[in-house]
Image: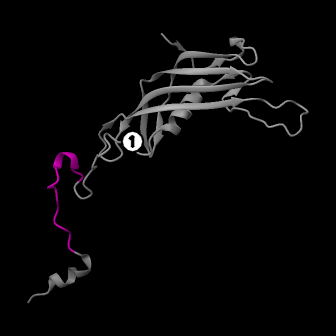
Amino acid sequence: MPQRADDLDLASLRLSPGEGRRLELEVGIGPLTLGSERYQASPERVPVLLDVSRMVGGGYSLRVRFTAAVAGPCMRCLKAAAPSVEVEAREVDRPIERGSDGAEELESPYVHDETLDLSAWVHDAFALAMPVKVLCREDCPGLCPVCAADLAEAGPDHAHEPAPDPRWAKLGELEL
């Protein structure tokens, strides 16, 4: 069973330069709000594979992989949707040495004092990997713009009389 971890002490892994380790962990992903709708990762605590490598010269190379579903309303018909999302994200944390000029600084916003904020990183990676439109199915027709009927249930024969053009309304008052 994977170990539960929202923060990970990288120093406790005691990796020597060039050495790496793969960890199976369980991380909680908080809810996301998109377009005033709330979406939740399913399951709430997601099993992740974390690869940690100590770099020569200091710092860490990190990679996280996991699969989770996005549970929430369909953006077309508002029914429950749960498309699966595969996530793979990489981070490099190589702090700059004091007094070295021209050195490239690669600091991860998720690593502070050799502690990885795994929960925040997984949450952000999940949000970036989510589909642009969360749909209950790829061919979801959505709702009728006139009566808000579910077009998947109403069928292809669903139609409305076109509304009269308001510019011609006064002509309807004429008595002939």
Query: Does 120 sit left or right of 39 as displayed?
Result: right
Identify the residue under disc 1: 134
Q: Is residue 150 above or below residue 172?
A: above
Q: Position of residue 24 (x, y in %)?
A: 54, 15
Tell me which colouring the rendered structure shows. one colour
Q: Is residue 52 above or below residue 84?
A: above
Residue 137 in view here: yes
- Amino acid type indicated by mark 1: Val
Based on the displayed image, in which of its 4 quarters is residue 12 positioned?
top right
- Residue at 69% across / 30% down in the picture? 92
The local secondary structure at tag 1 comes to: loop
Q: Quick one: quadrant of the C terminus?
A: bottom left
Using the image as rendered, state which of residue 57 and residue 26 is in the foreground.
57
Based on the displayed image, in which of its 4 quarters is residue 173 positioned?
bottom left
Q: Is residue 86 above or below residue 141?
A: above
Q: Position of residue 114 (x, y in %)?
A: 72, 21
Main SS type for the magenta part?
loop
